[in-house]
Image (cartoon, grey):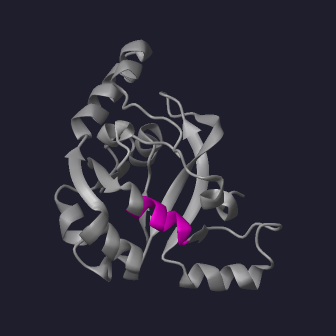
């Protein structure tokens, strides 16, 4: 698990990134209705988020926000999560996994981490999807800060596009492995 933004040095919080159309985050996250149509995804890796939102240039993802959440909330979501895909050997059978997915307020998937050119790396970053109770808690209890990192995304992208990877790397938010206890992720590793 990787942290980004101001929470990287905090023992009390974890950071997540999301991309939206301008001003939609607060409107979409003040009620549970957001999950009636899908999941709210926490993407704790800056470069993975840049891959997902195209450096804040993809339609509907022009604003990139760093959302600081409590470590307690993040770990609650992990404790109540299931893998987003069936994995033989992790789940007793597909039917059991399907029941777990329908009941769980959070889902975990592991996607390849990205380099500055957004190419996949050999290791994976955790993505955490929230719905139902988890979204309500995320919006009403866990969120302690929101920062617009769209200008940073654009600045890093400009440097990468110009071939100045050293300067771009200096601007990246500090990220380090999340200090999760083994039992917290035991059933969440494929």
Residue 165 sits in quarter: top left
Where residue 107 appears, as percent x and y from the top left, is 54, 68
Where residue 16 appears, as percent x and y from the top left, is 37, 51
Residue 5 sits in quarter: top left
- Asked if residue 75 is among those painted magenta in the image, a careful observer would answer yes
Of residue 63 and residue 170, the one placed in the foreground of this image is 170
| Residue in view at x 49 percent, y 42 percent | 2
**In the figure, is residue 164 to the left or right of 66?**
right
- Note whether 155 is above or below 184 in the view shown: above
Residue 61 visible in the shown view? no
Range drawn in magenta = 73-80
- Note whether 32 is above or below 60 in the view shown: below
Where residue 183 appears, as percent x and y from the top left, is 65, 59
Residue 28 sits in quarter: bottom left
- Note whether 130 is above or below 45 in the view shown: below
Tell me which secondary structure the magenta stretch mostly adopts: helix
Of residue 162 and residue 29, the one placed in the foreground of this image is 29
Of residue 52 and residue 175, the one placed in the foreground of this image is 175
Quarter in which the C terminus is drawn: bottom right
Where residue 105 appears, as percent x and y from the top left, is 48, 77
């Amino acid at each position: 698990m990787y942290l980004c933004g101001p929470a990287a040095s905090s023992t009390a919080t974890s950071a997540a990134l999301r991309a939206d159309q301008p001003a939609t985050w607060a409107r979409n996250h003040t009620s549970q209705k957001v999950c009636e149509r899908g999941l709210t995804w926490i993407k704790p890796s800056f470069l993975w988020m840049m891959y997902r939102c195209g450096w804040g240039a993809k339609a509907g993802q022009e604003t990139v926000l760093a959302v600081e959440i409590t470590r307690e909330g993040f770990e609650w979501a992990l404790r109540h999560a299931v893998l987003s895909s069936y994995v033989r050997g992790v789940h007793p059978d597909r039917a059991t996994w399907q029941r777990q997915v329908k009941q769980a307020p959070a889902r975990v998937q592991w996607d390849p981490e990205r380099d500055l050119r957004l190419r996949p790396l050999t290791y994976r970053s955790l993505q955490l999807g929230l719905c139902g109770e988890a979204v309500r808690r995320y919006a009403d209890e866990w969120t302690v800060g929101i920062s617009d990192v769209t200008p940073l995304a654009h600045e890093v992208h400009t440097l990468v596009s110009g071939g100045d990877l050293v300067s771009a790397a200096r601007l990246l938010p500090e990220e380090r492995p999340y200090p999760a206890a083994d039992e917290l992720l035991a059933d969440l590793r494929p």
